[in-house]
Image: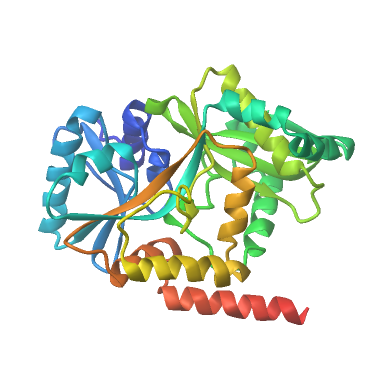
Amino acid sequence: MKEIPTWDKAREAVLKWGWNSTCYQIVNPGMSHWYPADETAVVGYVVANRTAIVAGAPVCEKELLGDTVTKWEAFAKSRKLSVCYFGAEDRLQQELGTKEGYTSVTLGSQPIWNPANFVRNIENEASLRAQIRRSLNKGVRVSEWDDAKARRNPQLEEVLSAWIKGRGMPTLHFLVEPDTLGDLRDRRVFVATQKDRVVGFVTLCPSPARNGWLTEQFVRTPNAPNGTVELMLYFAAKACVEAECTYFTMGIVPLVLPSAKATFADPFWLSILRRWAEKHYTRFYNFKGLKQFKAKYKPDDWEPVVVIVKGKRFGLSHLRTIVKAFTVCEPELALIASLFWQLGRRKH
């Protein structure tokens, strides 16, 4: 029997059992994959500082999660790798939360909706309706492009490249891999055009076992009319409603807690770092602004994004390792690169 390439095996597993909002990210470029002997699961991960950082959680049927974790961690141990689960959601939290030898901390949150509520909230909110009207009056139109049209489309790649260059951070990978235009078979792509010129696009990737979608990217050109992103998200959510989906999320907001009244047993140093980042790191990454943007669509709830590590404590070394997984380079170098980018922009 012909061997199925690991990427296709991972994709098949995700389409069968994918539940986490980030489950489809394990087929992104740069991911490694592990399978148990019976191939009833797959783990997508990257290695940084001798740590295997799992993208969310093992992808498998819920009943097999505990057994899969045991087998996966035995494999990691045989390779002399520590284990960290980044972006763990409710299933894995319940599985490991009562077991000794694990520590979890909250590093952010993600808003979730029933897509019908997302659409309704836009239609009932005057400021959002005004933004959409503004873009429509400027001639912006949104349509869905299939894989054949969108894959490696020069206009989409040009928009994405310009958007990445304007972020002020090194290109991120792992769960926020920007290079997704090479294969869009299972994704949905909604493109905004103005006079036949692409001014933005939104990509959705599936969370099949949850009957829903993650807004993986929402990208616009610097000169796109105000309201372009709102219009694209409105059309994307309406398409989810038409498909009778019941889950819709816009992804992680780093270092932001789910709600002001929520309490978490996080390390003291992490609480201080979170407050410092929200106050001073806006020039590089606007955590607070990102939360405000997503909050204006009035989420049904905010889910904690949890990191689970093996051991009695979550240390600064764990955080550095996670940052390295996203930036590839050492965190300090990423910060320095961002600083020089900001200084260069101010000179112009």
Residue shown at 69% from the left, 32% from the top: 122
Q: Give whichever of 160, 273 is nearer the camera.
A: 273
Q: Position of residue 189 (x, y in %)?
A: 61, 35
Position of residue 274 measured from the top left corner of the image (x, y, whole percent): 45, 65
Q: In this orientation, does residue 334 appear?
A: yes
Residue in the picture at 31% in, 65% down? 267
Q: Nearer the viewer, residue 132 or 83?
A: 132
Residue 165 sits above or below residue 261 on the image: below
**Where's the C terminus, which quadrant?**
bottom right
| Residue, far front | 261
Residue in the image at 67% along x and 81% along y: 343
Q: In this rendering, does residue 169 appear at all?
A: no
User: How far from the left and from the top, in percent, is residue 66?
Assistant: 16, 38
Q: Quadrant of the rendered structure where residue 278 is?
A: bottom right
In the foreground, 91 or 325: 91
Query: At 67% from the left edge and 46% from the top edge, which residue is drawn?
Result: 156
The picture quadrant where one finds residue 27 is top left
Residue 226: x percent and y percent?
80, 47
Q: Is residue 292 left or right of residue 155?
A: left
